[in-house]
Image: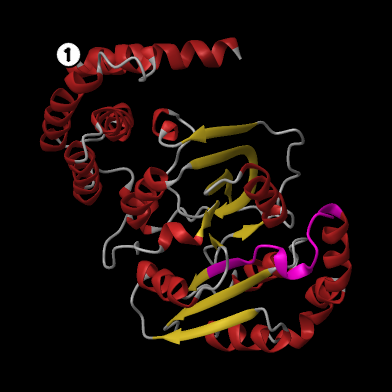
Amino acid sequence: MPIQRESQHFLRPLAAYLKKICTFALKYPLAKNLSMYPTISIIVPIYKVEPYIHRCIKSILAQTYPHWEAILVDDGSPDHCPEICDEYAALDDRIKVIHKINGGLSDARNHGLDIAIGDYILFVDSDDYIHHRMVEIMIEHAIGNNADIIQCQVLRGNEEQFPKIKKNGKTHLFENNDIFASPLQHSILCAKLYKRSLWKELRMPVGIVHEDDATTWKLYFHSRRTIVIDTPYYYYYKNPHGIISNENRRLNPVLEDIYHERISYFEKQGEKLLATLSRWQFCLPLMYLNLRGNLTQKEEKHIQKLLRKNIKQFVHCHRVPLEHRVAFTLLGLCPALFRGISRLIGKASKIKS
């Protein structure tokens, strides 16, 4: 779709650019000049997303915080995405475009990181989009709390409109590695604002799926302070036919290897508690797989072997929720009984509601 036809939809936020700057300056009077405000590098990997790319880029242009650069990484997309990216870049000098041969999601993100100049990094997938105040709210928390990572909740779905956000969403502060003991941590690379210094020695592994799982724990580990906002500002388009959606229903050896690497790293660093918590978090998807059923006999035996090996390492850890320790103990002893009790609890909950 030619951009000229849609100019009225996104030129409005561009025309309001100076107004946003003035509004933000009034909000933060301690800054003597506009250059003192942090710049955000928003990295968007792009490949075969022509139906969604306008929505994604418009959500970035609509941000109430004006100090950002958007790095659109065309990963050799065979559709009209490369031309669309160039047209947007011609309309706003905060948008940069990289054209490269196809190398996959991680490779595209890494190329964006290599040229990013912002004080903070934000990843947005090109079939997703973000709330118009997402960057403003997250940078407020970053400045106010001197945080290395600011994380918001993710809203999944395929609706056209972003639902109204909850007001007065709770905010949680985690010092050092306390986030590893919280169910609020998640492995999604997007929906987080990172200090760029966290990426100085880190890049994403290329050529594997679950690259987020292989990366986010390292960022959490090096973060001195992490903020979690209990409000969804990131809208995740859930593709029922996507690769990850289908893989999550099966036992994935790549994810298994990623957790083994993580556990081994913490053990070598002398971080016994983090290794123990990682074993617990590794067992959570195994428990959900067991509940879903539809496993082959070979898969079920392998899951039971993994569970027995890891459960004994965290079943006495007080940082693991008691209900999880009880559930995993039962699952390790008798999977059939565990599934039966879980179904009864599920039915009782439905009747009660």
Q: Which residue is mark 1?
A: 333
- In the picture provided, is 95 more to the left or to the right than 107? right
Location of residue 171 in the rendering, given as x and y in whole percent from the top left corner: 64, 34
| Picture residue at 55% right of the left edge, 85% below the top | 80
Location of residue 248 in the rendering, given as x and y in whole percent from the top left corner: 33, 45
Q: In this view of the protein, which residue sits in the foreground, 167 or 275?
A: 275
Q: Is residue 341 depicted above or below 260 in this figure? A: above
Q: In this view of the protein, which residue sits in the foreground, 223 or 57?
A: 223
Q: In this view of the protein, which residue sits in the foreground, 41 or 197?
A: 197
Identify the secondary structure beneath mark 1. Answer: helix
Q: In this view of the protein, which residue sits in the foreground, 180 or 279?
A: 180
Specify whether residue 195 is painted magenta.
no
| Picture residue at 43% right of the left edge, 12% below the top | 345
Specify whether residue 30 is painted magenta.
yes
| Picture residue at 58% right of the left edge, 82% below the top | 96
Looking at numbered disc 1 in the image, what kind of residue is underneath it?
Leu
Quadrant of the snapshot with the N terminus: bottom right
Q: Is residue 2 depicted above or below 106 in this figure? A: below
Q: Is residue 79 visible?
A: no
Q: Is residue 262 visible?
A: yes
- In the picture provided, is 193 more to the left or to the right than 112? right
For the record, the magenta segment spans 27-43
Figure quadrant of residue 282: top left
| Picture residue at 86% right of the left edge, 72% below the top | 18
- In the picture provided, is 69 more to the left or to the right than 297? right
Figure quadrant of residue 95: bottom right
- Colour scheme of the picture: secondary structure
- In the picture provided, is 20 more to the left or to the right than 58? right
Location of residue 35 in the rendering, given as x and y in whole percent from the top left corner: 72, 70
**Dot 1 crowding, Cα within 10 Å, few <14, some 14–19, many 20+:** few
Quadrant of the snapshot with the C terminus: top right
